[in-house]
Image: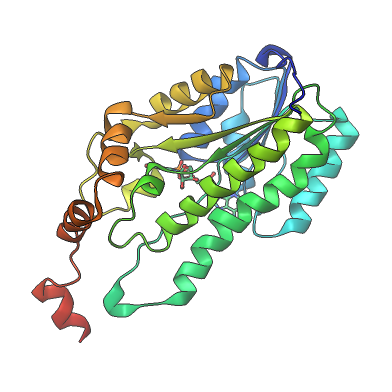
Amino acid sequence: MTHKHQALPMAEQVIWLIGASSGIGAALVGELQKNCKALIISARNEDKLQEVATGFDNVSIIPVDITQPSTLAQAAQQLTDRFGHIDTLVANAGTAEYVDVNHFDAALIRRVHETNFMGLVNCVEAALPLLRKSQSGYIVGVSSSVAYLPMPRAQAYGSSKAAVSHFLEAMRADLVHLGMDVSIVCPGFVKTPLTDKNDFPMPMRISAEDAARYMVKGMQKRQFEIHFPKRFSYLLKLIGNLPDFLRLRITASMSRAGTPDNKDSHS
Ligand SMILES: NC(=O)c1ccc[n+]([C@@H]2O[C@H](COP(=O)([O-])OP(=O)(O)OC[C@H]3O[C@@H](n4cnc5c(N)ncnc54)[C@H](OP(=O)(O)O)[C@@H]3O)[C@@H](O)[C@H]2O)c1
């Protein structure tokens, strides 16, 4: 049986945002702090966290490395001592690297999964006991719209995000019975240091500030899937649901693996 629960208004919430030192996370700090009671922000770079928190009375920082569960456990202990609970976890930290099949490297895939998938799982492990003490605990995990469609060069990033989406939906199926909510965030392209490195076209790219506004709007309604910009995410969902023969033709046409430059330089 599902326990009915009343979501605590965001204005009364203690929120732990992990991955807040740049990009979407840094933009989220500005949006979330004006809507919540207390915001604790984490990432590895302490100086950048300090910079992001400057000027906000209700924002404090706790540095963590999500690939090191002991740092998350220490942070959770500090949160327990200070607040006794948290109401929302926003697991936003992530990284991106792209695969060259002519130079296949399992270590690259392991690295990306260690941060994007196991890192998020580590965040949930640390936060869950604190969320269970909330009136209506809420996990927001950042996946990506790439999870809708397996694309060339995304064997590491895309599969880590598909794993994140699968994990979060499975968590929701259990946690709903404990009075908790889960949201999956699937952004399209957002202008951040992560995408500034990309050397491929990024259609319909939006600003980190717009992404943060979309996210907070979805979080206020506790939407299960928060995806934006809609014109991009619906397009990927549409292609992702085409019959194999069409979908595979479209994704193969995006590959550079067989172009003379690529084949020759790695043969
Ligand atoms: N930008 C896009 O187009 C896009 C699209 C879809 C999904 N996303 C997802 O959105 C999230 C934010 O990405 P972004 O574009 O804003 O990238 P970003 O500017 O590179 O920010 C990534 C954040 O994650 C933190 N982080 C990375 N590794 C970490 C670790 N081991 N421990 C703790 N924190 C760590 C970084 O902080 P430190 O380096 O200080 O640790 C930083 O705060 C990611 O999950 C990304 O996959 C982005």
Please state if 27 lies on the left or on the right of 3 as rendered: left
- From this view, report whether residue 105 is shown above or below residue 164: below
Residue found 39% across the figure and 24% down from its top: 210
Residue found 75% across the figure and 41% down from its top: 127
Judging depth in this view, the residue of 79 and 170 nearest the camera is: 170
Q: Residue furthest front?
A: 1
Quarter of the image for the C terminus: give it. Answer: bottom left
- From this view, report whether residue 245 is shown above or below residue 59: below
Q: Residue furthest left?
A: 260
Quadrant of the rendered image containing residue 36? top right
Quarter of the image for the N terminus: give it. Answer: top right
Please state if 255 lies on the left or on the right of 4 as rendered: left
Q: Residue furthest bottom?
A: 267
Task: Where is residue 111? Give x, y as percent.
Answer: 52, 66
Quadrant of the rendered image containing residue 265? bottom left
- From this view, report whether residue 250 is shown above or below residue 14: below
